[in-house]
Each structure stands twice: as C-alpha cells, then as structure tokens.
Image (cartoon, grey):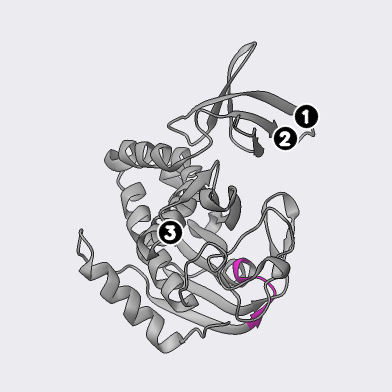
Amino acid sequence: MTSALREDALTARVTDAMSAGPDGGSSPWLGVTVLDRVDSTNAELVRHPRPWQVVTADHQQAGRGRLTRSWETPPGMAVTLSACVPAPVARAADLGWLPLLTGLAVRDGLVSLGLPDAVLKWPNDVLVTTDDERKVCGVLCELVPAAGLAVLGLGINVHQQRGDLPVERATSLALCGLDVGREDVVVAVLTALGRRHAQWALPARLPTLVREYADACATIGREVAISLPDGSVRHGRAERVDAAGRLVVRTDVGETAHAAGDVVHARLAD
C-alpha cells in the first residue's frame, strides 16, 4: 500500500489543524513543497533556506542519518520531510534542544494518530514499545548559522512490511497496526512541530518542554551504553536530561553529561 501527498492540500490542512487545536492560533508554516524525488530533503532546504518552509518528497535517494549513515526511502512508502525554522543566535545556549523537540513532536503527532506506545530514545529516535522498541522514525537537524535558521529533518516509516526495511531493528506504522496515509502523518507532525517550536521560542516555557520531553523519553532510568564519537563506549545509568538537552549518565566514577553519541538501551530483565 502507498498513499499520495497532495501539495495543494497539505498547507491548508496544517493551518486548519493548528487553529483547531487546544491552543488555537495561526499556523507558522508558509508552504509545503512536495517533490517527486530528491537527493535529500535536508540538503534541499540547506541549499535554499527559507523560514517556515517545508519540503517533503515521494522518493528520497540520498538521505542522511546521524553519524553519516545513509538512508533511502522507497517511493510512496515513507514520510521524508524537512522543515526550516528560526534558530536565533541569541538562543545559542538552547539550540541543542531543536533536535530533541523534533523527536518529541514526531512522537506527539504519532500519538495523536493512534500510536500511544511511541516513545523517545535520547536524543531523538522514535521507538514503538509494542514492536520490541524498534525504530519508526529518525531525526537529523542542521543549523544554517548565517541565516539564523535550522533545518529539522525527519523520516518516518509508514507503509513498509518487515521485508521492506533495511535493518532488523526498524519498524513501520503499518507493522504497528496504524493504518494511516502519509498526508495524515505530515499534517499531524507539522502541527505538533509548530507547537513545540513555539514552546521553545519562549525561554519561560523551556522548563515545561524539558519536563515533557523527559516524560516521553524511555532512556531515562535505563542502563545504557553510549558509543561516543571518538569510538569509546561508556556504560551507566541514564539519570536525566539536563536543561541543555544533554543526557546525564551515572557511572562508577560519578555523573557525566553527553551532548552527542549513540545510546544503546540495555535490555530489561524478564
């Protein structure tokens, strides 16, 4: 099964969804561009950064994940989307929260569509607990400092069956029993992303964002192994996410805060 993306309908649907939400208000999104194929939606917006613009594609051929991993999506089966948002230099200390709030917004959107078992693995992977904590969405964010913007990129597996997925630890919305079209997923995620960015944009609301992220993050309280960019591995218990979005891990030598790295959750005892 595949589902279509209709450029002429997406912006209007997002505008309606945001005005009808509990907070009301207007939508910040100025337009959604739908491409048949693209190397990478992130690369497309980094080349031509425009605030509050969104690019999605039916077929992404050279997408990138964290730590330079490649990611290609088959036509019509997934949502690949990048959104360009303000990232003011004056908020430099809080920019680390943009990737985290993107993952949280995806989780918000999927819950609103009927997937209550979606959780976060720090910093921004979206997992589904009812499918053995397999990954349904990944996030890659890039700053465009000269323009004071950030490109928030995400990829969500929608219609794939198990054999369509590149790795065993991946899942899709279909495999999790959620039968929705890609357009519905785009609308739900952009609605949530607009609200989460508005929350981040007001420093007084940042503590609430930190708390709500922590509530959705399955990493906290778990024994974890962190593969760091220098190749080393650190083991310990994930205690919390601090005000800068770093994962605080307690080891036998004390607490350390990590701003980047791959987190591997230890399996819970049966």
- Mark with earlier residue (1, 3): 3
Labels 2 and 1 touching (C-beta < 8 A): yes
Q: Secondary structure at mark 3?
A: loop
Residue 115's disc number: 3
> Dot 3: few (<14), some (14–19), or many (≥20) neighbours within 10 Å?
some
Q: Is residue 99 left or right of residue 215?
A: right
Identified by mark 3, the residue type is Leu
Position in image of residue 228 (x %, y %): 72, 34
Q: Secondary structure at mark 1?
A: loop
Q: Find disc 2 in the rendering and name its residue.
A: 227
Q: Position of residue 42 (x, y in %)?
A: 60, 66
Could one spot residue 139 in this view of the protein? Answer: no
Q: Residues within 10 Å of mark 2 (few under 14, many from 20)?
A: some
Quarter occupied by residue 65: bottom right
Q: Circle 1: is it few (<14), some (14-19), or many (20+) Cα within 10 Å?
A: few
What numbered label is drawn on residue 97?
none
Separation (CA) of disc 2 from disc 1: 6 Å
Task: Give the amino acid type for the residue marked by disc 2 in the picture.
Answer: Ser
Residue displayed at 46% across by 37% down: 93
- In the picture, the quarter occupied by the C terminus is top right
Between disc 2 and disc 1, whose residue precedes? Answer: 2
The secondary structure type at the circle numbered 2 is strand
**Residue 251 at x, y percent in the picture:** 62, 17
Mark 1 vs mark 3, CA separation in Å: 35 Å
Dot 3 or dot 2: first in sequence order is: 3
Q: Which residue is mark 1?
A: 232
Q: Is residue 198 left or right of residue 142?
A: left
The quarter in which the N terminus is drawn is: bottom right
Any magenta on residue 19?
no
